[in-house]
Structures are given as structure tokens and as C-alpha cells.
């Protein structure tokens, strides 16, 4: 009788363990720049429907995500809003460098709250950013937010960094930088064009030329040691021609 009970328990728990292993095998964890939340969410949802797998998204600034991965966070795919943080993880031996590649591009724009008296204008190198508005300027924190780094490059090339420094309002990621503008807590902000296009609470004042900052490029790579079948499938799906219409739908360049 005792052995019969043991047999029943084994038969009861074994399928459960197998199911857990299968579930874990079919899960893909993507650490992705916050500015890609809509496009990557939609592509991941399409992938889940086609493969019956699960995609877990962790969205934050690229620098924050890179530090998490460096400190042991379980990620399968990393998508950065610039090459700097991908290179950072490569130097730490955390990414499969053979899979590192550019996946999309973006633009930088100057935005203001919808009810602002500021009007849209054609960009010129004669722009007086310092005196264009009186209040604070929302940007991503340049220490770990790529959009903030691009914003600082623009400000430096317009020769007004020191004068504007006391008016900066750094945010934890580019979405937060945009939200502050939407709430009217600042007079202006420098954010990605794709984020600005989705908001009905702000207006785009002007688009900055690439000559004022490094080209806004997103990079993708598999995390070393996590090159499992599902991860590779999603990686290939994200960079495929099938996903191109979704990237274009949200305003990204390929």
C-alpha cells in the first residue's frame, strides 16, 4: 500500500514538473529600451500568437537594463537605444557579439505642452534655444538614458549647455521626460520623434538634424549563454521583413 501511494504521488507530480520545464523553455525575456514599448510589445504579441510561446518584456532606460544584466538579471535578448550600452555589455562578456546588429533608427525633436504659446518652426542653426522659452527643459538623464545623451549633444552643439544647465529636469527614461511635458510641468522637452507622435498632449516645435547629435540607432543582441531556440526565433522575428510594417507604423526607420 505504501509503495502504491508513492507511485501515485510520482505520477501526479511528474507531468507538473515537465509542464513547468516546457513553460520555462518557451519563455523569452526581452530587456528593451523604454522608447520601444509599443513596437516591441506588438511584435512580441504577434510572435506569441504564432509560436504559442511567452514573451516577458522589461522596459526601462538602456543604461538601467544593462546594469541589471551585468548584475545577473535573467535576460535572453537586449535591445538598446544606442550602441554604447550594447558595447558596455560586450566588454563585460554578457552578449553574443555575433548577434549584435542595428535594428532601427529614430529622430530627436523639441516639444512643448499642447497649450503652450510656442509655435512650430523650421529648424535653423540660428535657433536661440536659451531664450526660446523661460522655464525648465525636460530631458532623459544623460548618465544612463540614450535620449538624454542625444539631447545633451544637441544642446552642446547649439552652444548653450552652461547657460541652460540650471534649467534641466532629467528623467529616469525618455517616456518620463515626455510625460513631464504632457503634464505642463516644464516649458519644453527634447525627446524621440516616435514618442512625440503618439501623444495628443504635446506639440512638436521642430525636428533636430542628425548633424547635431549622433545618429539615433537601436541595437539588438542575444545574451551570452541564453541562445536558446525560442530566443533565436524571436530575435530573427524582430529583425525580419515581416516585422518591418510594425516598425514603420510607429515611425521608426529601418
Image (spheres, helix red, strand yellow):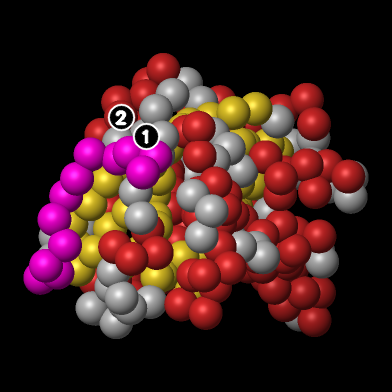
- Of residues 137 and 222, the one drawn nearer to the viewer in this rendering: 137
> Which residue was labeled with disc 1?
252
Q: Is residue 53 left or right of residue 141?
A: left
Instruction: Give residue 199's position: percent from left, percent from top.
Output: 20, 58
The secondary structure that most of the magenta stretch takes on is: loop
Q: Which type of secondary structure does the marked residue at label 1 adopt?
A: loop
Count of numbered circles on the image: 2
Is mark 1 in CB contact (under 8 Å) with mark 2? yes
Which residue is painted at 24% across and 64% down in the image? 112
**Along the horizontal axis of the image, is 205 left or right of 223?**
left
Q: Alpha-carbon distance for marks 1 and 2?
A: 5 Å
Q: Is residue 120 highlighted in magenta?
A: yes
Q: Count neighbours of disc 2 (C-alpha within 10 A) and say few if under 14, some if 14 to 19, many if 20 or more.
A: few
Q: Looking at the picture, how far across and down is residue 75, in whole percent? A: 68, 54
Residues in magenta? 115-126
For label 2, the residue is 248
Q: Position of residue 99 (x, y in %)?
A: 71, 28
Residue 182 in view of the camera: yes
Q: Residue 212, position in %: x, y?
A: 50, 39
Amino acid at each position: 500500500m505504501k509503495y502504491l501511494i508513492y507511485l501515485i504521488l510520482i505520477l501526479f507530480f511528474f507531468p507538473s514538473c515537465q509542464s513547468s520545464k516546457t513553460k520555462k523553455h518557451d519563455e523569452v525575456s526581452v530587456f528593451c529600451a523604454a522608447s520601444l514599448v509599443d513596437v516591441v510589445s506588438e511584435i512580441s504579441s504577434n510572435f506569441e500568437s504564432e509560436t504559442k510561446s511567452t514573451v516577458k518584456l522589461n522596459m526601462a532606460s538602456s543604461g538601467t537594463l544593462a546594469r541589471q544584466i551585468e548584475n545577473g538579471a535573467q535576460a535572453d535578448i537586449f535591445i538598446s537605444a544606442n550602441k554604447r550600452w550594447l558595447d558596455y555589455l560586450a566588454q563585460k562578456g554578457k552578449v553574443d557579439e555575433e548577434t549584435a546588429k542595428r535594428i532601427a533608427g529614430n529622430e530627436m525633436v523639441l516639444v512643448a505642452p499642447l497649450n503652450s504659446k510656442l509655435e512650430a518652426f523650421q529648424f535653423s542653426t540660428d535657433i536661440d534655444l536659451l531664450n526660446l522659452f523661460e522655464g525648465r527643459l525636460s530631458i532623459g538623464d544623460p548618465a544612463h538614458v540614450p535620449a538624454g545623451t542625444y539631447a545633451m549633444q544637441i544642446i552642446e552643439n547649439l552652444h548653450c549647455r552652461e547657460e541652460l544647465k540650471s534649467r534641466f529636469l532629467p528623467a529616469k527614461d525618455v517616456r518620463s521626460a515626455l510625460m513631464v511635458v504632457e503634464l505642463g510641468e516644464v516649458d519644453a522637452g527634447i525627446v524621440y520623434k516616435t514618442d512625440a507622435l503618439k501623444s495628443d498632449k504635446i506639440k512638436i516645435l521642430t525636428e533636430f538634424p542628425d548633424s547635431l547629435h549622433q545618429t539615433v540607432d537601436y541595437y539588438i543582441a542575444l545574451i551570452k549563454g541564453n541562445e536558446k531556440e525560442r530566443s533565436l526565433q524571436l530575435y530573427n522575428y524582430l529583425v525580419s521583413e515581416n516585422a518591418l510594417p510594425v516598425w514603420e507604423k510607429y515611425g521608426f526607420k529601418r
